[in-house]
Image (cartoon, rainbow, N blue to C red):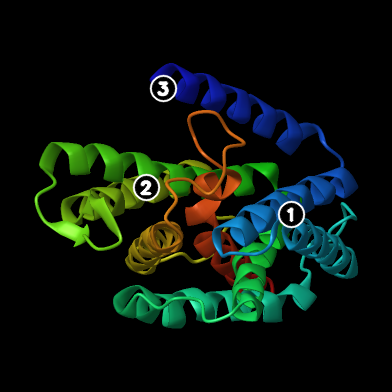
Amino acid sequence: MLRARVITALILLAGLLAALFLLPAPLWLAFASLICAIGAAEWAGMTGFPPSARKVYAGLVGALCVAAGAVAGLHRPDTVAPFSLAPIYAVSAAFWIFCVPLWLRAKWRLPSPAAAALVGLVLLLPPALAIAHLRLLSPWLLLGVMAAVWVADIAAYFTGRAFGRRKLAPGISPGKSWEGAYGAVVAVVVYGLVVLSSVGHGGAAVSYLAVVPALVAFTALSIIGDLFESLVKRQAGVKDSGSLLPGHGGVLDRIDSLTSTLPVAGLLLLWMAH
């Protein structure tokens, strides 16, 4: 299993880097929409859609991603500030910041297929558009934001294994601990400050006292995204969202923390460009 995980991870990383730096903007938007559609199919499977409806739902979500991206100009390499995405990002941010913490606490279940379809759209469309948006600004920017999520995941895992004593959410994800969460916060803050010091900030007045709370909030969002998918999987009685990636489960298993962080990053960048 470990060998399969490592091989799959290396293949995914190589493919991601090649696509990130080589694909033209229209194909990158298509790639992001494909990821969105695959995630939608997995979401539909976990939330009880009939098999025939899963493909229809995935196709509709993927097509909507292409359409929304085209309207925002994400297929054009000269697009800098696609402000039409702001409402989409804002809905996503409100969902993750205000709704999901209550959802996790109450362990709500999706009441109907219509609710599942709507939540899946909020879950998947904004991060897919953010993937296209951030990459237009700079492939390195998108990679840096994604790397922050990976740093959080890795730090939480190893810190939790070494020092984990108090369960973070035992009824949702028994393997996660508060100590792991603290380790993730420390690692992301260090990572963020090192990156900021290394690349500079374009002459902008940046207060490190403001950056640190932002990085803490970013880490908290990544953990919330992870916990939300864990809750849905637990309620569905499945270990993984899918089986597309050997040793890693499905696409949603790999992007759970990105679904909650990328739209907020996109919204912040639009605010800074305003």
In the rendered image, which residue does mark 2 sit on?
A: 152
Mark nearest the camera among 2 and 1 is 1
- Give the CA separation, mark 2 to mark 1: 26 Å
- Give the CA separation, mark 3 to mark 1: 27 Å
What is the x, y in percent for residue 273?
68, 71
Mark nearest the camera among 2 and 3 is 3
Looking at the image, tell me whether mark 2 or mark 3 is earlier in sequence order.
3
| Residue at the spot 35% in from the left edge and 75% down from the top edge | 107
In the rendered image, which residue does mark 3 sit on?
A: 1
Check disc 2 and report its element: helix, strand or loop.
helix
Q: Residues within 10 Å of mark 2 (few under 14, many from 20)?
A: many
Amino acid type at image mark 2 = Ala
- Give the CA separation, mark 2 to mark 3: 23 Å
Looking at the image, tell me whether mark 3 or mark 1 is earlier in sequence order.
3
| Residue at the spot 54% in from the left edge and 75% down from the top edge | 93
Which quadrant is the N terminus positioned in?
top left
What is the x, y in percent for residue 22?
80, 32
Amino acid type at image mark 3 = Met
* Above/below status of 9 relative to 71: above
What is the x, y in percent for residue 10?
55, 22
In the rendered image, which residue does mark 1 sit on?
A: 37
* Above/below status of 13 relative to 104: above
| Residue at the spot 68% in from the left edge and 28% down from the top edge | 15
Check disc 1 and report its element: helix, strand or loop.
helix
What is the x, y in percent for residue 21?
74, 34
Residue 17 visible in the snapshot: yes
Q: Are marks 3 and 1 in contact (CB under 8 Å)?
A: no
* Above/below status of 51 relative to 159: below
Which quadrant is the C terminus positioned in?
bottom right
| Residue at the spot 39% in from the left edge and 64% down from the top edge | 224
